[in-house]
Image (cartoon, grey):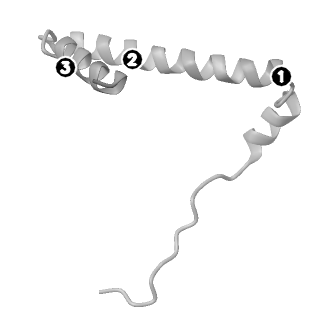
Amino acid sequence: MSYSQIAQLELMNALNNINSEAELNEFKDLVARFFAQKAQKAIDDLWDKGIINEETIEQWGTEHMRTPYRYATHRS
């Protein structure tokens, strides 16, 4: 069994014990904080290696990263 499959089972077991909206919100917050910490660690590692710096972060703030949409010429 892969770690992904084990993780899915663990999550399902945890979700089976959620009995209220408040518990669900607490669980969602916990998962969000887990992934936010992982993202912060990855960013810190990039900073420590000199891959990103303050200028890079400033550039990110001004980038327009929205996916361009192409509309079909024929609409049905």
Residue that badge 1 annotates: 49
- Disc 2 or disc 3, which is closer to the eye? 3
Locate residue 18, reporting x and y percent: 16, 11
Indicate left or right for 76 with 47 as reference. left
Indicate left or right for 74 with 10 as reference. right
Q: Where, by quadrant of the figure, is residue 59 drawn?
A: top right
Sequence-wise first label, 2 or 3: 3
- For residue 32, the mark is none
As rendered, which of 44 and 26 lies closer to the eye?
A: 44
Residue that badge 2 annotates: 31
Mark 2, secondary structure of its residue: helix
Mark 1, secondary structure of its residue: loop
Locate residue 23, reporting x and y percent: 22, 10
Locate residue 1, reporting x and y percent: 27, 24
Residue flagged by tag 2: what amino acid is it? Val
Residue at left 33%, top 19%? Answer: 28
Sequence-wise first label, 1 or 3: 3
75 lies above or below 45: below
CA gap, disc 2 to disc 1?
27 Å
Mark 3, secondary structure of its residue: helix
CA gap, disc 2 to disc 3?
13 Å
CA gap, disc 1 to disc 3?
38 Å
Q: Are marks 1 and 3 in contact (CB under 8 Å)?
A: no
Residue flagged by tag 3: what amino acid is it? Met
- For residue 12, the mark is 3
As rendered, which of 30 and 76 lies closer to the eye?
A: 30
